[in-house]
Image (cartoon, rainbow, N blue to C red):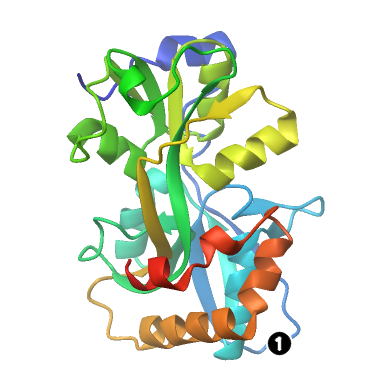
C-alpha cells in the first residue's frame, strides 16, 4: 500500500481540473480599523468553515475571526495569504509568511514548530457515500481512500500508528481539498478522511449525500505554527490570549457563527491535554 500522488492524474484531467491550483501566492488582507498596527502574515489555504473568501472576496471563517480578535488584543493586524498547503514549510522557511493558521493539527508535530495554542479541538474522521457498505473503520480494509496531501489523515493511513486503522488498498493524496469530495462522489475512491468540520460544511453547502463514520481517527488540538527557531514571544502571548478568549466567551461566540454546536470543540480538558 502506498500513497498515489500521480495515480489520480488521469481522472483529474477527465473533468478538467488540475491538481495544483497555482504556484504563486496571492494575498488577501483581513479587515481592521487599526490600519497602523504591525502586520502578521498568515499562511493558509481555502478550508471552510475555517478559512475561505466571502462574497466580497475578503477572508472569512473561524480562523480569520479568531485571528482578528486574538491578534487585535495584542496590537497586531492579521494579513491572510493563500498558499499551496503542501508548500507551507518552504514558505515559512523563506519568511514569506510569519505563521501557519489553517485548522492545523498539533498532534505529532509538537517539535516541528513553535506553537500557539491549541485554541480548539478537532476530530479527524472518515466519510463515505450515503449508500456505502462501509459502516466502521475496520470496513476500510482493502479499500481506496483519498486524503489531502501533507495532512494528518495522510500520515495516519500511511503510517498506521493507530491500531484501529486497517490496511487499505491505496491512499490517494490530493493537492486540492475540493477534489476529495469530487473523487468520492464520482466513485473513484471508497472513502475520504479530513477534519469533521470541513466535511460537515461541504454537506451543508452542497447537500452532499455523505455519511461520517462514528469512530474518529484522531481527536487533536489545533493551533498556530511559527518557525521552530523563532525568538519571538508572540506564540506564548497568543496562547495566553486564547485562554482568555475561552474564559470570557468570545471564542464560543465566534464558533457559534459557523458551527451548529460548540461544546465539543472547546472542552477545556481536551484542549489542555493536547
In this rendering, would 230 be left or right of 21? left
Q: Is residue 200 left or right of residue 119?
A: right
Q: Locate residue 59, reporting x and y percent.
A: 68, 59
- Residue at 46% across, 42% down: 23
Residue 174 in view, yes or no: no
Q: Measuring 58% from the left and 16% from the top, which residue is drawn there? A: 185
Above or below residue 218? Residue 242 is below
Instruction: Give the answer, above or below, for where 181 lies relative to 63.
Output: above
Q: Residue furthest right?
A: 55
For numbered disc 1, what is the local secondary structure?
loop
- The mark total stands at 1
Residue at horizontal 37%, vertical 44%? Answer: 86
- Residue 120 position (above or below residue 23): below
Residue that badge 1 annotates: 34
Q: Can you say which quadrant of the picture contains the C terminus?
A: bottom left
Provide residue 190's location: percent of width, then percent of height: 44, 15
Amino acid at each position: 500500500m502506498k500513497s498515489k500522488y500521480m495515480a489520480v492524474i488521469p481522472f483529474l484531467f477527465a473533468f478538467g481540473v488540475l491538481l495544483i491550483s497555482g504556484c504563486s501566492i496571492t494575498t488577501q488582507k483581513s479587515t481592521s480599523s487599526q490600519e497602523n498596527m504591525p502586520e502578521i502574515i498568515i499562511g493558509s489555504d481555502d478550508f471552510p468553515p475555517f478559512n475561505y473568501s466571502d462574497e466580497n472576496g475578503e477572508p472569512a471563517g473561524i480562523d480569520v475571526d479568531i485571528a482578528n480578535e486574538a491578534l487585535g488584543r495584542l496590537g497586531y493586524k492579521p494579513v491572510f495569504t493563500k498558499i499551496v498547503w503542501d508548500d507551507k514549510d518552504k514558505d515559512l522557511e523563506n519568511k514569506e509568511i510569519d505563521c501557519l493558521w489553517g485548522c492545523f493539527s498539533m498532534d505529532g508535530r509538537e517539535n516541528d514548530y513553535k506553537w500557539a495554542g491549541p485554541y480548539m479541538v478537532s476530530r479527524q474522521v472518515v466519510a463515505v457515500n450515503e449508500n456505502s457498505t462501509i459502516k466502521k473503520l475496520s470496513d476500510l480494509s482493502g479499500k481506496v481512500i483519498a486524503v489531502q496531501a501533507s495532512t494528518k489523515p495522510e500520515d495516519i493511513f500511511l503510517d498506521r500508528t493507530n491500531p484501529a486503522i486497517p490496511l487499505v488498498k491505496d491512499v490517494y493524496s490530493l493537492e486540492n481539498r475540493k477534489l476529495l469530495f469530487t473523487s468520492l462522489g464520482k466513485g473513484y475512491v471508497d472513502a475520504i478522511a479530513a477534519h469533521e468540520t470541513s466535511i460537515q460544511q461541504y454537506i451543508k453547502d452542497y447537500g452532499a449525500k455523505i455519511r461520517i463514520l462514528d469512530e474518529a481517527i484522531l481527536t487533536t488540538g489545533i493551533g498556530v505554527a511559527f518557525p521552530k527557531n523563532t525568538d519571538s514571544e508572540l506564540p506564548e502571548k497568543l496562547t495566553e490570549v486564547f485562554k482568555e478568549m475561552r474564559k470570557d466567551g468570545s471564542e464560543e461566540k465566534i464558533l457559534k457563527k459557523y458551527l451548529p454546536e460548540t461544546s465539543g470543540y472547546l472542552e477545556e480538558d481536551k484542549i489542555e491535554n493536547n
